[in-house]
Image: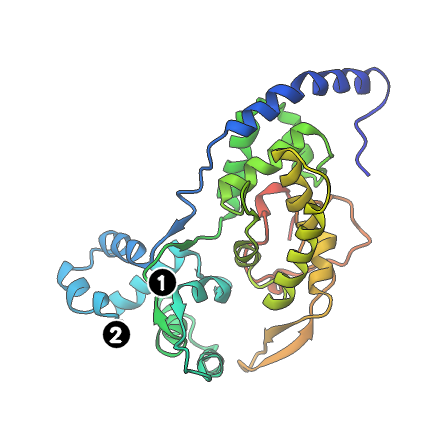
């Protein structure tokens, strides 16, 4: 477990923390909820990509705004650009299904949309290596098979670079010492007032947490990129959050720490994934079900030197993981 040190260092640290408790909690309590940039619409991404790629305005009016995405080069690269902006496409790992699903609503009477979408994706030949073409064909599987496009704000998963900036902002916001950041990146999140408010700050700025509703389980699942079966993930995460809320009344920072850290650290997420399977593409494009690897979903509490835990190859990762910028795990 984390130790604050011994001797004079420990005493000095304790005095400093006790002096800061009031100011940290007071500042955290009045901090705004900066989540306005955590979501965007499909149309906003379409407009930005069309501008960046020099797509003529008439094509937007005559095709894309009418939900038509033909298989020409401009359209294929436009779709790739939209996917990159909304984080449902990555040139290395491909389609991020938990993210793109946010933008489509199946018809209530349609009972086969999942099977059709899966069959379409499975039929995508591995020989298609052009990133624009592959993004376009993967996108069409959802656009044509899954349901109707929903032109409303949806959560955009954070990249590692964005997460690192957020954690630096939170460190600066509370005036924490620079060595705190190294400690957090090393996977050590002690149960003290400074760390509690740091965790809350990251949760607020990423849009993964609010004081009113606690952790946003749906967004956490999307940020994790289908790290487990969604129903299992939601059920077990909700159970853990409810158990934390049964305790006595907590301050805002402590409540955030108890739920975000206690319910979404790596060993807790292992529990969520322990009884689920993941779909792994084979060399022929077929998919086989395999057991989720143990500790494949590290979160806040990952530490360097955890040599007793199996390593996961890059191919086993789908995309970013929950709160990825909070530590420096190499994979």
Residue 300, can we see it? no
Q: Quadrant of residue 249?
A: top right
Closer to the camera, 105 or 60? 105
Q: Residue at x 72, y 30 (%)?
A: 192
* Residue 72 in the image: above or below residue 161: below
Residue 39 shown left or right of residue 50 in the figure: right
Residue 287 shown left or right of residue 116 in the figure: right
Residue 201's label in the rendered image is none
Q: Residue at x 49, y 64 (%)?
A: 96
Which residue is the site of mark 1? 80
Q: Residue at x 47, y 61 (%)?
A: 99
Which residue is the site of mark 2? 70
* Residue 109 in the image: above or below residue 269: below
Q: Which circle's residue, 2 or 1, is located before the other in the chain?
A: 2
Classify mark 1: helix, strand or loop: helix
Classify mark 2: helix, strand or loop: loop
Residue 302 shown left or right of residue 29 in the figure: right
Mark 1 Cα shell of 10 Å, populated few (<14), some (14-19), many (≥20): many
Residue 187 at x, y = what percent? 70, 41
Closer to the camera, 54 or 95? 95
Residue 179 at x, y = what percent? 66, 27
């Amino acid at each position: 477990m984390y130790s604050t040190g011994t001797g004079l260092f420990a005493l000095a640290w304790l005095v400093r923390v006790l002096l800061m408790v009031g100011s940290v909690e007071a500042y955290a309590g009045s901090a705004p909820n900066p989540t306005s940039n955590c979501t965007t619409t499909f149309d906003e991404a379409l407009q930005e990509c069309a501008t960046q790629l020099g797509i003529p305005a008439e094509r937007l009016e005559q095709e894309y705004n009418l939900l038509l995405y033909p298989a020409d080069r401009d359209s294929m690269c436009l779709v790739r650009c939209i996917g990159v902006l909304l984080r449902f496409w990555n040139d290395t790992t491909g389609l991020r299904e938990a993210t793109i699903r946010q933008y489509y609503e199946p018809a209530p009477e349609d009972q086969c949309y999942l099977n059709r979408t899966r069959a379409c994706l499975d039929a995508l030949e591995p020989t298609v290596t052009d990133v624009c073409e592959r993004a376009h064909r993967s996108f069409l599987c959802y656009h044509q098979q899954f349901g109707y496009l929903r032109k409303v704000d949806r959560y955009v998963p954070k990249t590692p670079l964005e997460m690192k900036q957020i954690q630096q902002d939170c460190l600066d916001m509370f005036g924490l010492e620079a060595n705190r950041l190294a400690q957090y990146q090393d996977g050590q999140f002690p149960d003290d007032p400074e760390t509690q408010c740091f965790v809350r700050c990251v949760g607020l700025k990423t849009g993964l947490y609010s004081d009113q509703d606690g952790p946003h389980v749906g967004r956490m699942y999307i940020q994790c990129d289908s790290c487990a079966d969604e129903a299992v993930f939601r059920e077990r995460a909700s159970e853990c959050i409810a158990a934390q809320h049964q305790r006595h009344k907590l301050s805002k920072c402590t409540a955030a720490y108890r739920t975000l850290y206690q319910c979404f650290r790596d060993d807790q997420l292992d529990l969520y994934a322990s009884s689920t399977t993941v779909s792994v593409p084979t060399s022929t494009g077929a998919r086989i079900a395999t057991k989720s690897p143990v500790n494949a979903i590290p979160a806040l509490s990952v530490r360097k030197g955890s040599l007793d835990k199996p390593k996961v190859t890059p191919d086993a990762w789908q995309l970013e993981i929950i709160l990825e910028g909070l530590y420096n795990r190499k994979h």
